[in-house]
Amino acid sequence: MVKSFSEYMEAWLYGPEGYYANFKAIGKEGDFYTAVSTSRFFGATIAHYMISLVKEKKLSEDLSLIEIGAHQGYLLGDMIEWIAQEAPQLLERMRFGIVERFPALREAQKAYFRERFGDAVKVEHYADAAEIGAKEAFFVANEIFDAFPCDLVYKGKTALVDQKHAILFEGEDEEVLATAGRYGQEKGEVARGYENFAASLANAAEKIVFVSFDYGEKYVRPDFSIRIYKGHEVFPLFEEGLDPASLFGKSDITYDVNFAHVSDAFEGAGFRTAAYKTQLKALIDFGLMDLLGQLAKMGNQALYLRELNKVKTLIDPQMMGERFKMIEFHRNIG
């Protein structure tokens, strides 16, 4: 049966045997690294920024902190740990949650939080952000927009995939081509689902701050960026000799994010684009150097140097610092 590429990618990542349907290791033992797996200071710095918004009265102490696409839950756990150090009074008033639709991942997350925090922290789970119903919420996500299924366009045609995993540019999906046309895109990926996601998030709380990190640019590339990660190796999807059938559901498939599309989707749902920065600038602006300074004052030089080396990966322009971007949206925030 011939499918659109977005249907094919949906099955690859989220089908019954899809890559994300069950827990997969991230980091050295997995197929790729993320900022979260690199350093706990990534989550700590975002938590520090969230606390600053509370101090500035832009958010109240009775807010919900929700991670979307949490994998095992390391990012949320790192943020909670920092809140306990910098503003422990918030732990008594805040709610914590994860938006996760897969039961297997929910169970892995619950086990992780029990192991890390025991009964001291309660984390609620939601299948969809619209279920949350909070008054105020700070949402955080890392590398979720590149995991939305996408369609492929080339010379006015959209990609179809046949039973043998062959990609054929013979489709004429008008919606996909219209979206591509909006960004002057003749070749590359067109994400599906950003608009529905933003609308769902808009119904999650009255006041919202949403911070997300991903790789991409605020313009479209004039070429395909879609690629497969397996065992820390990268395989362009259209690489000669590549056999997608052998990697289907067993590896991650991803592409560069068009942040202009993300912004348009969120602004269409009533959000304001509050910031768009490189990961380097965002983490520095959020207070990363202050946190490292606090660690240095503790006097454990070996620990400080070890963590500093990890942080360099996050902010080095030749590594994650420039390649990854932060985008921040506000809804009803003064």
Image (tube, helix red, strand yellow):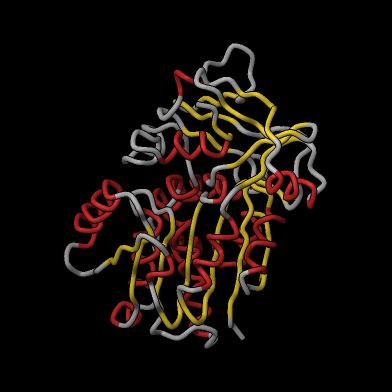
* Residue in the foreground of this view, choosing between 67 and 22: 22
Q: Residue at x 48, y 82 (%)?
A: 54
Corner quadrant of residue 297: bottom left
Observer-nearest of 240 and 316: 240
Residue at 36% over, 60% down: 127
The image shows residue 209 at horizontal and vertical percentages of 54, 73
Location of residue 172 in the rendering, given as x and y in whole percent from the top left corner: 71, 37
Residue 164 drawn at (x, y percent): 51, 17
Above or below, comparing residue 323 to residue 142 in the picture? above
Horizontal and vertical percent position of residue 128: 40, 62
In the image, 124 versus 249, the foreground residue is: 249
Residue 251 relative to residue 95: left or right: right
User: Which image quadrant: the C terminus?
Assistant: bottom right
Q: Residue at x 41, y 41 (%)?
A: 14
Query: Based on the displayed image, in which of its 4 quarters is residue 65 positioned?
Result: bottom left
- Picture residue at 17% right of the left edge, 67% below the top: 119
